[in-house]
């Protein structure tokens, strides 16, 4: 074999081996993990909860209103294992009521402490009442005899107004009509006693981000742990937080076990969100 043919044979062998290695590497690479609108919805609800807590700590009504607007965008699907009659821990209406109360308190503080107008108004009213009590009683003015007016026939009663039109039919769906977060996360609300643990199983889809969050009512700390079928811990968030979050990316469909623990000395209401 001539040197030229030997060189061509070697180059062909190298290219063949490189192609085999590339194909093997392609087979070993994990499937890309995609996010879902529902997983993004879980993240937005948690962000709204943290913003609301920040607003309460600083008595910032605008922060509560922004958190309410964030919740407005995320629809929720009712979970099957929740306690009956328990609503979500966070609602847009509840945050707006809190914001209104904060603004009313702030106006009262500004009026009394800064301007003092409310205090002066109360003092002036007290002085007026005292002066009225010390003043001489007023004599009633003499009444003039009423003159009899000629009787006239009473006018006829006007016809009754027409009945109001019927109300429009209710919309086909209540809540969020259109949302960038798809059908929304699954929301399950439970009441947990002190040191009580609540566990349940979920089926994770492969090649898709799984996001689970636990939102407490703020009275106690909540721990969140996710395990696989063999009991191995895949995620644990127990850093003394009211809003623990676990984000996983399973490469294949799997059944996982979620555990929520109330670490406080009081009972608490916990809302678990997942996609």
Image (cartoon, rainbow, N blue to C red):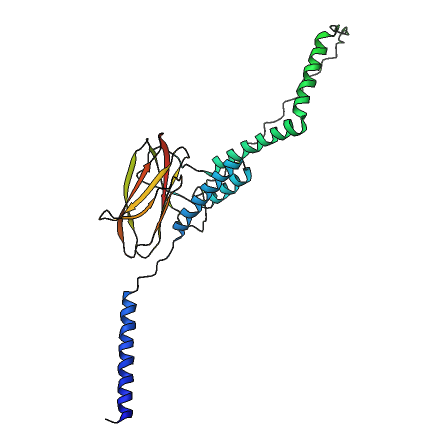
Toward the viewer: 165 or 179? 179
> Residue 253 appears in which quarter of the rendering?
bottom left
Looking at the rendered structure, the number of numbered marks drawn on it comes to: 0
Residue depicted at x 68% and y 22%: 120
Residue depicted at x 53% and y 37%: 58
Residue 14 rendering spot, x and y as whole percentages: 28, 80
Which residue is situated farthest in the left direction here?
230
Which residue is situated farthest in the bottom direction here?
2
Image side of residue 199 versus residue 216, left or right: left
Image side of residue 174 versus residue 20, left or right: right
Residue 21 rendering spot, x and y as whole percentages: 27, 73
> Residue 5 appears in which quarter of the rendering?
bottom left
> Residue 140 appears in which quarter of the rendering?
top right
In the rendered view, tell whether residue 46 sits above or below residue 219.
Answer: below
Residue 15 makes an appearance in the image: yes
In the rendered view, tell whether residue 102 sits above or below residue 143.
Answer: below
Toward the viewer: 125 or 262? 262
In the rendered view, tell whether residue 80 sits above or below residue 146.
Answer: below
Residue 33 rendering spot, x and y as whole percentages: 35, 58
Looking at the rendered image, the quarter that the N terminus falls into is bottom left
Toward the viewer: 251 or 74? 251
Residue 134 rendering spot, x and y as whole percentages: 72, 7
Residue 275 makes an appearance in the image: no
């Amino acid at each position: 074999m001539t040197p030229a043919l030997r060189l061509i044979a070697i180059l062909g062998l190298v290219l063949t081996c490189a192609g085999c290695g590339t194909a093997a590497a392609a087979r070993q690479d994990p499937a890309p993990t995609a996010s879902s609108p529902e997983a993004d919805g879980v993240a937005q609800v948690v962000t709204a909860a943290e913003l609301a807590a920040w607003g309460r700590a600083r008595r910032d009504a605008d922060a509560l209103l922004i958190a309410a607007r964030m919740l407005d965008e995320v629809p929720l699907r009712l979970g099957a294992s929740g306690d009956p009659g328990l609503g979500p821990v966070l609602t847009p209406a509840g945050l707006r009521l809190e914001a209104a109360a904060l603004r009313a308190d702030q106006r009262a503080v500004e009026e009394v402490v800064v301007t003092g107008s409310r205090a002066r108004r109360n003092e002036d009213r007290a002085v007026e009442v005292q002066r009225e009590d010390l003043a001489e009683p007023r004599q009633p003015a003499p009444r003039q005899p009423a003159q009899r007016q000629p009787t006239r026939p009473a006018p006829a009663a006007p016809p009754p107004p027409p009945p109001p039109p019927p109300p429009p039919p209710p919309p086909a769906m209540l809540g969020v009509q259109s949302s960038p977060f798809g059908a929304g996360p699954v929301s399950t609300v439970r009441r947990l006693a002190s040191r009580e643990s609540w566990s349940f199983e979920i089926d994770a889809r492969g090649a898709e981000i799984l996001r689970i969050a636990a939102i407490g009512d703020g009275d106690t700390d909540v721990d969140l742990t996710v395990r696989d079928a063999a009991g191995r811990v895949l995620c644990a968030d127990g850093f003394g937080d009211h809003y623990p979050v676990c984000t996983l990316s399973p490469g294949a469909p799997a059944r996982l076990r979620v555990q929520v623990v109330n670490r406080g000395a009081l009972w608490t209401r916990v809302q678990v969100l997942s996609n």
